[in-house]
Image (cartoon, rainbow, N blue to C red):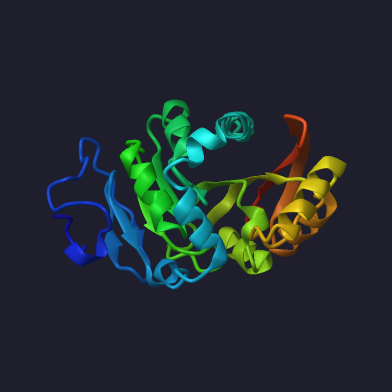
Amino acid sequence: QLRGVRPDSVRGVGRSGLHDRHPQRLRIRRCRHYHREGAVAASNAGEATRGDPVQQEYAALAPTYQKRWARYLARTTDHTLQQLDRRPVRRLLDLGCGTGLLLRAAREKLPGATLLGADFSIPMLRQAQRYGTPAALIGCRAEALALKSESFETVVSASTFHFWPDPASALREIARVLVPGGRLVLTDWSGDYFTTRLAARWLRITGRPFHRLYRATECTQLVESAGLRVNRITRYRVGIVWGVMTVVAERPPGR
C-alpha cells in the first residue's frame, strides 16, 4: 500500500499491484497523496466530470482509442517530443495524457526524469496503466491542477486543447506549475487548415463533443495572456484531413 494514499482513492490498482521498480514521489496538492509509477489516483476535480459529454465519450473510446488513432498519435507524439530542446528535464507533466503513449515515448527520451500524467478521464488513465506507462497518473481537469506551484520544467499537452472549456484558466494553471524558464509544448488541431475546419463542422453536426477549434493566432493570444512567451509555432498535416499545430512557449525567467 502507498504511504499516504487511502486504498479507496486508488483506481484500478490493488494493494500489492504497484510497479515500484523505480519509485518516484510527487506531492499532489489538495489530494495530499504520494504516487508511484503504476498508481492511478482520482482527485475530486476528476471525479466531478462523470456527467461530462467528453468524459462519457472517452470512457467508451478508451479500450480502442490507441489503435483507432494510431497513425495520428504516432505522428503528433513524435513531433511534440522533437520540440524539447537540450535543456535538462527533471520533471515533466503530460496534461491530457490519455492512454500514456507520449509518456512511454518520453521515458525513452528522458530516462532520468520524473514523469506525471494527468487526465480527467479515469478510464483512459486505467488504459495507460494497462499499457505499463512508467509514470504516476492523476485524474483532474486542466483548469484545476492539484499540483504544487513551480514544480515542472516541462509541460506537454497533445490534442486536448480543443476540449478545454476554459482554456484561459487552464493556461494560467500551466504557467503556475512551470518553474521560471520552464516550457510548454502544446499540440492540437489547427483551424488554419480548411479540411480541419470542415472536420470540426462535421463533428458539430453529428453531436460529437469538443469545445472549440483554434487558429494559430488565437492560440498564441491565449498562451501569452496567461503570462507565457511563445517562441515558435509549427504547422503540419497528418493525413488528408487533420492540420495540426505545435506551440512552444516558456514562462519567462523572473516571473
Where is residue 184? Give x, y as percent: 62, 48
- In the rendered image of this protein, does residue 28 appear above or below residue 13? below
In this view, the residue farthest toward the top is 108
159 in relation to 212, above or below:
above
Tell me what residue is drawn at x 87 percent, y 43 percent: 194
Q: Position of residue 250 (x, y in %)?
A: 66, 49
Kindly tell me whether residue 202 is visible in this rendering: yes
204 or 102: nearer the viewer: 204
Quarter where residue 232 is shown: top right
Q: Which residue appears at 49% of the width and 37% of the height?
A: 66
Q: Quadrant of the N terminus?
A: bottom left
Q: Residue at x 48, y 63 (%)?
A: 149
Q: Is residue 193 visible?
A: no
Quarter placement of the C terminus? bottom right
Residue 43 as seen in the image, left or right of residue 18: right
Give the residue at x 25% y 59%.
10
Identify which residue, 120 or 155, lies in the foreground: 120
Marks counted in the figure total 0
Q: Quadrant of residue 143?
A: bottom right
* Up-down relation of residue 248 to residue 112 (above or below): below
Left or right: residue 141 versus residue 161 is left
From the viewer's perspective, tell me whether residue 89 is left or right of residue 241: left
